[in-house]
Image: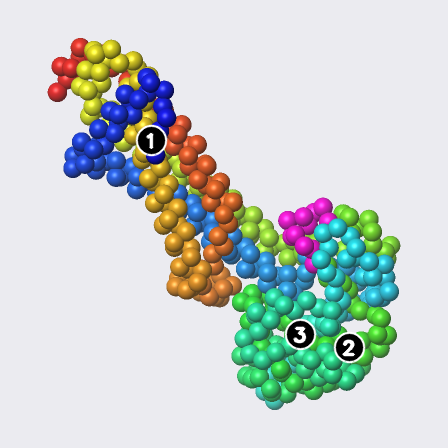
Amino acid sequence: MKLKLPPYLRVSYFIASRLRSGSIKGFSSLITQIAIASIAFGLSVMIVSFAIFEGFKKNIQAKIFNFGGHIQATKHDSGNSYEEVPVSTSSVLYKHATTLPGVQHIQKYARKAALLRTETEVQGVIFKGISTDYDTSSFKEMITQGRLPDFQKGDYASEIVISQRIANKLLLQLHDEVTIFFVQEPPRVRKLKIVGIYDSGIEDFDNQIVIGDIRLIQRINNWADTLVGGFEIILSDFQELEKRFFEIYDFMDYDIQIIKITDLYSSFFDWFIMLNRNVVIFTFIILCVASFNIISILLILIMERTQMIGTLKALGATNTQIRYIFIFNGLRILIKGLLIGNSLAIGLCLIQKYTHIVPLNRENYYISFVPVEIDWLSIVFFNLLTISFVALVILLPSFIITRIEPIKSIRFS
């Protein structure tokens, strides 16, 4: 497909094409390849960096949401204690929350401080009781052995799911029985069977959270079946958290308080903000380096063709026509760099996404491999950003052409 150019630019495009074909083995070819590699490397690093950041954020956020939803609702005077003041499932919030825009699901839960004891070890835990209305679809992905408790059993399920970290500390295995002491006066004791082991990789949860039947907590606390510790609200779009929070706040019962997951686990979300800031700074540095390389390379190409520029001027070519010769060459470099950069970045991301070939230290990064999340909108954004920067940079060196005098340049050797 031939470009439809104005007549005065066809000559520029023809000369640019001849320069490309005539310098395949020359010095110009070498520095052109360097320019293409510079753009390709810069673009691929930006795309891969952002994909890794999004992968980390999505993976860790999903784990946090498994333990707290997007918004938690409790009684006003429950404070920060794990001894919760109960709230009723007959409340307006629980019955009608899903009628609000953006609210996907609401689920009840209860928590209680407890001690797990074996013959030789004792471990303090938080027993989190859940029920059949709890969305366990994503939590199941963290279960490495066994299953969730059967919430259809009898009065309550005498089954629990513990973390791999707790299992290692207490030397417990799947199907073992463990004694649990609920911290209250007088203490209440139960024997429970381990039917599942999960591994979130997040120490804050793995060190203390035990999953069981909410009906056990109701029995221990002498609560009615309609009383629970609180509600977790799941939104259809986490990005709308701020907006939906205030809508729920205006809708809920007067004696209930709500808190965002971003405030409840602020340390994690502050970490995401810091990482995002680092990605922005890193992107800017890469663009600056790539732009500097393009400027240097185009200047070299112009200086190498000084005699040709002088001859063209002597033959009547305008500065604009000569400038477009190098702009066309620059655009060719840009397009090749974009194609190679996108192919390299997407290829690396797909390989890592499906093979997990690059490992991580789970203790430090909460996950055993480098996670990647391919976001096509971000890829388009980085391409447009690169095009904007490089297109602007391509124009700058070409203005040096106006300063070249035909007589002096023809004599230049």
Q: Secondary structure at mark 1?
A: loop
Closest to the camera, between mark 1 and mark 3, is 1
Q: Quadrant of the N terminus?
A: top left
Residue 397 on image: x %, y %: 32, 24
Q: In the rendered view, tell whether residue 132 sits above or below residue 31.
A: below
Sooner in the amino-acid sequence: mark 1 or mark 3: 1
Q: Which amino acid is tagged 3?
A: Ile
Tell me the number on the disc at residue 211: 3
Pointer 3 local density, CA inside 10 Å: few below 14, some 14–19, many at least 20: many
Res. 321 visible in picture: yes
Residue drawn 65% across the image and 52% down it? 238
Q: Residue 83 colored magenta?
A: no
Pick out the residue farthest to the front.
1
Q: In the rendered view, tell whether residue 2 sits above or below residue 222.
A: above
* Residue extent of the magenta highlight: 234-244
Q: Secondary structure at mark 2?
A: helix
Q: Mark 2 = which residue?
A: 215
Residue 14 on image: x %, y %: 26, 25
Q: In the rendered view, tell whether residue 337 sits above or below residue 108.
A: above
State yes or no: discs 1 and 2 in contact (Cβ < 8 Å): no
Pointer 2 local density, CA inside 10 Å: few below 14, some 14–19, many at least 20: many
Residue 367 on image: x %, y %: 49, 64
Q: Quadrant of the C terminus?
A: top left
